[in-house]
Image (cartoon, coloured by chain):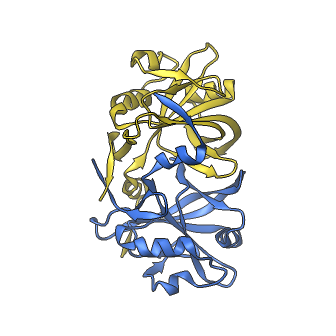
Chain colours: A blue, B yellow
């Protein structure tokens, strides 16, 4: 049986929620990562992925500047990095350098891949849609990469307050 | 280290992936559910959620007819129902009746809530965007409900081939 609840309370039943890192090169040539939970695939052929970014985000500026971005699925081992990328702004600092992140060049877009991620998807911006207080940026995937180590596993937000963990089937 | 991979292979690193049921009332007054993995929140204030629907889906017709839909987070116990809703078309059958689904009236929109779900979100269509081979329907959440039993847990697709299970933090 269902009972009416405030949205802000009901939405806490969403966890575990996937988390991705979106990376884009800014006007100064700095590769800037952000942690994003609001993301989905939107098309199979051609492959497309969407990320939702707050209107004032520096990452949105960087993506608009370059017209490209990478979506990385972070591994469990990257939880501290993800927390950092999600809580600082690229306006103030070089987040990848701060975390000494291992990166490698992308092949089709201007920014970098995260070497420790489970997978990286290179995207060219196809659409930008306004939805409430966020901008939905939809990218067409033009190249895909997976970790050479097949055992690395994806990271999730498992509860309110940015609790980042792996998950296993129950 | 990353290695270039075909998208169709790389994307299999996405699991576990959340699954939702979207329900809309069709032109005949039938409440039609569909299972959707491509979904995300897109705005916090106002609260909005997006679902990606293949262009030919009967659910898209029903949502366009009514301008409203419910997003339900199915519980682990609903795995067989979710598989059914995802593999049949409402053009051919009454999926909720076929599964003897427990439902209750929504309060702000024309369709029903799933009584066994972890949560139900009533949505009014705010936007419809074309992205590749799917249509992204964005709804504004106008009412929210959670299961009276706080112990029910959300269902996920944990691997290719529609393997539906609960997940636990690792």
- Residue B161 locus on image (x, y percent): 33, 41
Tell whether B140 sits left or right of A169: right
| Farthest top residue in view | B28
Check the image and report above or below for B23 versus B5. above
Identify the residue shown where x is 51% and y is 82%.
A96
Check the image and report above or below for A168 versus B102. below
Q: Is residue B47 visible?
A: yes
- Residue B136 locus on image (x, y percent): 62, 42
- Residue B88 locus on image (x, y percent): 43, 24
| Nearest to the observer: residue B42 or residue A123 | B42
| Quadrant hosting residue A67 | bottom right
Identify the residue shown where x is 39% and y is 59%.
B10
Quarter of the rendering occupied by the N terminus of chain A:
top left
Identify the residue shown where x is 32% and y is 52%.
B168
- Residue B114 locus on image (x, y percent): 48, 27
Check the image and report above or below for B165 versus A55. above
Q: How many marks?
A: 0
| Nearest to the observer: residue B60 or residue A109 | B60
Identify the residue shown where x is 47% and y is 71%.
A82
Tell whether A38 sits left or right of A15: right
Tell whether A154 sits left or right of A28: left
| Quadrant hosting residue A137 | bottom right
Check the image and report above or below for A83 versus B132. below
Q: Is residue B4 visible?
A: no
| Nearest to the observer: residue B81 or residue B162 | B81
């Amino acid at each position: 049986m269902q009972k009416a609840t405030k949205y802000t309370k009901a939405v806490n039943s969403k966890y575990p929620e996937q988390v991705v890192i979106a990376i884009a090169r800014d006007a100064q040539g700095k590769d800037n990562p952000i942690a994003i939970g609001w993301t989905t695939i939107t098309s199979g052929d051609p492959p497309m992925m969407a990320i939702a970014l707050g209107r004032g985000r520096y990452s949105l500026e960087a993506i608009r500047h370059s017209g490209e971005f990478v979506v990385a699925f972070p591994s469990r081992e990257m939880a501290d990095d993800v927390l950092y990328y999600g809580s600082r702004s690229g306006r103030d600092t070089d987040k990848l350098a701060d975390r000494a992140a291992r990166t490698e060049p992308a092949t089709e877009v201007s920014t970098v891949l995260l070497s420790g991620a489970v997978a990286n998807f290179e995207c060219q911006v196809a659409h930008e849609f306004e939805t409430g207080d966020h901008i939905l940026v939809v990218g067409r995937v033009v190249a895909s990469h997976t970790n050479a180590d097949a055992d690395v596993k994806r990271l999730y937000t498992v509860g309110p307050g940015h609790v980042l963990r792996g998950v296993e089937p129950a």
